[in-house]
Amino acid sequence: MVNSSNPMRKKLLLGWTVLSLALLYTPVFMLVFYGFNAGQFALRWEGFSLRWYAAALSNEEMILALLNSLLIGLFSTVISVALAFTYCLWAQRTRFKRLAGTSDSLMSLPLFIPEIVLSIGLLVMIVRFLKPAFLEMGFNFDSLAAVIVGHATLAVGYASLVLRTRFNSYDIQQELAARDLGAGSRQIFLEIMLPQIMPGLAAAACLSFAVSLDDFYVSYFLSTGGSALKTLPLYIWSLQGRKAMTPEINVVSSVLLIVALLFFCTGLTLSRSRSSVENLKGPT
C-alpha cells in the first residue's frame, strides 16, 4: 500500500509545487511581458513593441530617480554593513553570550516590525532630534541624508543576519596562531579575518543594496511623499496616479525588478560560495 501510493504522492507534491511557483511568478512575468505592449494603455495588449522601453530609458525624470536610488543604496549599504560588521565582531568576541543572544533578537526585530511603523518612527526621530542637532552644528540634514539614514536603519538587520552566520564559522585558531607568531592587529585583520569574512560582507552588501533599492515607505515618509527627493519606487508611484497608466510603468517596474534581483542573487551566491568551498575541501 505504501509503495503503491508513493508515485501518487510525488505527483501531487510536484503539482502543488508547480501551482505555487505559478502563483508566485505569473504576476512578475505578466509585468515584464506587458512592458513590450505597443498600445497606449498598460492593461490592454495591442501588439509587440519596444516603444515604451525607448520612452522610459530616454525619460530624464526616470533616469534621475534611478540615479537617486543607486546613490542612496550605495551610501546606506556602506553604513549598514559597517554597523553590522562592528556589531557581529562584538557579538562574536564578547564573553556575555546571553547578552549577545538577546542582542541578536533585537537586531532582527526590525525585520518583523511593519515597515510603515518603522518609517513613521524614523520620521519623528529625524525631524525632532537629528535634524535640529545637525543644524546646531552647522550642517544641513536634507531629505537625501534622511533617506540614507532610514535605508541604513532598515538594512542593518539584514546585514547583521548574514554576517552573524559568517562569523559563526570564523576560524579564530588562525588568528590566535598569528598573534603567537607576532602578527599585529592590522595584519590579522587584512590577511586572516577579512579573507574569511569577505563572502559574508559581499553578500550583506548586495542584500542591503537590494533592500534599499526597492524600499517605498521609508523613502515616501522621509522625502515628504517624494516632493523633496524621488527614488525609482516613488517615481513608479507617481506614474500610477495618472488617469490612464501607460506601459511605461511596466517598463520602469521591470528595470527595478531586474536590478534588485541582480543584487539579491549575487548576494545569495556569495553567501553560499564559502560553504561550498569548505564542503569541497572536507575536514582537515
Image: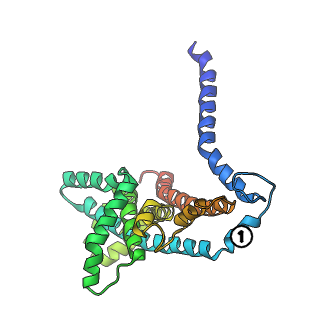
- Is 195 drawn above or below residue 163 in the view shown? below
State the residue in front, 162 or 240.
Answer: 240
Q: Position of residue 203 (x, y in %)?
A: 47, 62
Image quarter hosting the C terminus: bottom left
- Asked if residue 2 lies left or right of residue 103, the reply is right
Q: State left or right for residue 57 relative to residue 208.
A: right
Q: Is residue 177 visible?
A: no
At a point 46% along the width and 74% down the height, the residue shown is 228
Disc 1 residue crowd, few under 14, some 14–19, many 20+, Cα 10 Å: some
> What percent of the width, then of the height, locates residue 216?
47, 61
Q: Position of residue 164 (x, y in %)?
A: 35, 57
**For the residue marked with disc 1, what is the amino acid?**
Ala
Q: Quadrant of residue 256?
A: bottom right
- Quadrant showing the N terminus: top right
Residue annotated with mark 1: 55
Q: Is residue 94 visible?
A: yes
User: Most extreme residue toward the bottom, as rendered?
Assistant: 138
